[in-house]
Amino acid sequence: MSTSDPDKPKRRRRSKASEDTPASEAPHASASESGVTSEPQSAGVEEIEPAPADEAAEEAAADVVLEAADEVDASPAAPPRPAPSRRRAARDPSLPPPVVRAHAKYVRTSARKARLVCDHIRGRSVEEARAILAHTPRAVARDWSKLLESAIANAENNHELVGEDLYVKAVHADEGPTIKRFRPRAMGRATRIRKRTSHLTILLTPKE
């Protein structure tokens, strides 16, 4: 037989029902002991739903928009603006015939070589100048041919002239800036290379 100490405090047994209850449902001993009482929280919080929009106001606004769209559709469309006419007025016969010019600048050839070709087409008709440049073996003849076609296009588009009725009134080649380069030579020396350029000009006018 075991003997118990009379000074030792006795333990209290918890009932089975108290063990099964969760801690949230159990009463707060600390609050009751301190004398502070807490009010129980409400089980559910009612949510406030926003009030629905006024359907009548929405329908009225939609009707106003539809009426405005109908008025826009019913309005007559503005007549299309006519395209500006590019046809020039008839030239006065008393005035001198127009002169059409075309320039080609900084052509990579010397002015002397360009003059050897342009002397053959001065005073010639457009058809004769085309034939001469097409059968000239010099490389600058291709630049002169391109410049001649450019002058013919300017006459047809800007002055309403017929290309076959024109002739070469004046043609000349002017010197342009010279590009300077150097070539190494023997014994540490260097010689200058001059890469010359030229400015080509063609003037066309109608035949009399």
Image (cartoon, rainbow, N blue to C red):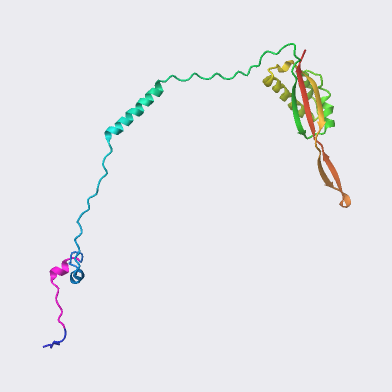
Magenta span dominant secondary structure: loop
Image location of residue 113, percent across then percent down = 83, 31
Is 148 placed above or below 198 here?
above
Is residue 133 something that shows in the picture? yes
Q: How many marks?
A: 0
**In the image as oriented, which residue stretches furthest toward the right?**
187
Image location of residue 121, percent across then percent down = 81, 22
- 32 sits left or right of 199 in the view: left
Residue drawn at 70 percent across, 23 percent down: 154
Image location of residue 161, percent across then percent down = 70, 17
Foreground residue among 142 and 207: 207
- 141 sits left or right of 189 in the view: left
Highlighted range, magenta: 9-22
Q: Which of the 4 image quarters holds residue 126?
A: top right
Image location of residue 96, percent across then percent down = 76, 15
Q: Which of the 4 image quarters holds residue 147?
A: top right
Residue drawn at 40 percent across, 22 percent down: 73
Is residue 139 something that shows in the picture? no
Query: Is 11 covered by the magenta stretch?
Result: yes
Of the 4 image quadrants, the one containing the C terminus is: top right
Foreground residue among 125 and 83: 83
Query: Is 51 covered by the magenta stretch?
Result: no
**In the image as oriented, which residue stretches furthest toward the front?**
35
**In the image as oriented, which residue stretches furthest toward the left?**
1
Residue drawn at 20 percent across, 59 percent down: 41
